[in-house]
C-alpha cells in the first residue's frame, strides 16, 4: 500500500491507531484456519465516526478492508487475503454502553468480550445465553458476524436469537441502523438478521443491541 494511504489513515484516526510494522502485520495475518495473509496496515477506530471515515476513504481509494475480532473464526473471514487494512475493535470500541433493565437488553460495541457481557448481565440478575467455546476471549462483533453458538444452544438458541438491533457502516461509509430494542418491532425487512453471520462481507458492525433474559435459577 502506498505510504500516502498510511498517512491519510493516520490523519483520520490519529498516529497511535495505524500500524504498518512487521510485528503487527504478522499478528493480524491469521485466523483459526491457520492460513496467513499479511495486511498492509492494522487500524484501530476510536468510534463509529472513525469507521465511517475509514470505509469512505478506502472505498474511494480501492483499498480492501477486513474487520477482525479475535481471529478465532474457522471460515477465513478475518484473513486479509488481498492485503489492505485490518480493522480492529479491541483497542477502543470495547465498551458495554448500556444494560437496559426495563427492556432487558445490552447495548455493546463490537470489541466487548462475550464473557464480560455475561458477567455484567449476571451481576444485575440477567443472562446472556450464547456461549461459544471461545467465550472467554472472543468479542461479540465476531460472534454476531459468525452467528456463534455454544453448549447452551439446544436450550436457549444461538447468537441470532439474541440480536435485537445493530448499527453498522456500509462499504461507502454510510451508517445504517437496523432493528429496535423492543420485541414488537415488526415493520420492514429484517436487515439486522441479514447482517448476522455475514462475516464482514456486507458492513462493519459498530454497535449491537442484544437481548438478555432473566438469570435462570439453578
Ligand atoms: C477453540 C475455538 C472454539 C470455538 N468454538 C466455537 C463454538 O463453540 N461455537 C461457534 O459457533 N464457534 C466457535 N468457534 C468459531 C467462532 O466463530 C469464533 O470463536 C467466534 O465467534 C469468532 O469471533 P472472532 O472475533 O474471533 O472472529 P474473527 O475470526 O476475528 O472474525 C470472524 C468473521 O467476523 C467478521 N467480523 C469480526 N468483527 C466484525 C465486525 N465488527 N463487523 C463485521 N464483521 C466482523 C470478520 O471479518 C470475519 O469474517 C470457535 C473457534 C475456536 C478457535
Image (cartoon, helix red, strand yellow):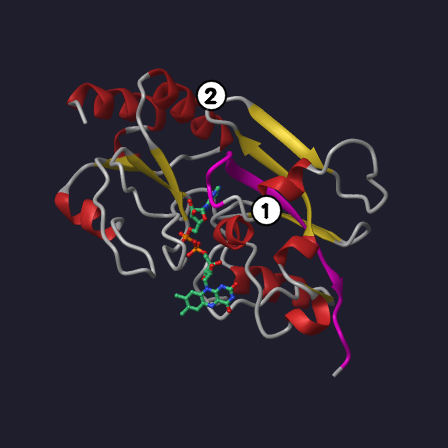
Mark 2, Cα crowd under 10 Å, few <14 / some 14-19 / many 20+, is some
Secondary structure beneath label 2? loop
Q: Residue furthest right?
A: 184
Measuring from the top left, give residue 121's x and y in whole percent. 66, 62
Q: Callout 1: 10 Å neighbours few (<14), some, many (20+)?
A: many
The percent coordinates of residue 29 (x first, y second) are 25, 49
Could you tell whether 140 is left or right of 66 in the image? right
> Residue 73: x, y in percent?
41, 57
> Which residue extends farthest top?
60
Which of the 4 image quadrants contains residue 59?
A: top left
Image quadrant in which the N terminus is located: top left
- Who's the residue at 55% across and 60% down the image? 148
Residues in magenta, as a range: 199-217
Task: Give above or below for 157 relative to 177.
Answer: below
Q: Quadrant of the C terminus?
A: bottom right
* Nearer to the camera, 166 or 7: 166
Q: Name the residue under label 2.
A: 172
Amino acid at each position: 500500500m502506498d505510504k500516502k494511504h498510511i498517512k491519510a489513515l493516520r490523519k483520520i484516526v490519529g498516529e497511535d491507531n495505524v500500524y504498518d510494522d512487521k510485528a503487527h502485520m504478522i499478528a493480524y495475518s491469521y485466523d483459526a484456519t491457520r492460513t496467513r495473509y499479511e495486511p498492509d496496515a492494522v487500524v484501530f477506530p476510536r468510534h463509529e465516526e472513525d469507521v465511517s471515515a475509514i470505509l469512505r476513504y478506502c472505498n474511494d481509494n480501492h483499498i480492501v478492508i477486513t474487520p477482525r475480532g479475535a481471529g478465532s473464526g474457522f471460515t477465513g473471514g478475518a484473513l486479509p487475503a488481498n492485503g489492505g487494512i485490518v480493522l480492529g475493535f479491541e483497542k477502543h470500541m470495547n465498551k458495554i454502553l448500556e444494560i437496559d433493565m426495563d427492556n432487558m437488553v445490552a447495548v455493546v460495541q463490537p470489541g466487548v468480550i462475550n464473557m464480560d457481557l455475561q458477567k455484567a448481565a449476571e451481576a444485575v440478575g440477567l443472562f446472556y445465553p450464547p456461549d461459544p467455546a471461545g467465550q472467554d476471549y472472543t468479542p461479540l462483533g465476531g460472534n454476531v458476524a459468525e452467528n456463534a453458538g455454544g453448549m447452551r444452544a439446544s436450550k436457549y438458541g444461538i447468537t441470532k436469537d439474541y440480536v435485537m438491533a445493530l448499527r453498522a457502516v456500509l462499504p461507502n461509509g454510510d451508517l445504517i441502523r437496523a432493528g429496535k430494542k423492543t420485541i414488537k418491532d415488526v415493520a420492514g425487512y429484517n436487515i439486522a438478521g441479514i447482517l448476522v453471520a455475514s462475516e464482514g462481507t456486507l458492513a462493519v458492525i459498530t454497535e449491537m443491541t442484544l437481548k438478555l433474559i432473566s438469570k435462570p435459577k439453578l
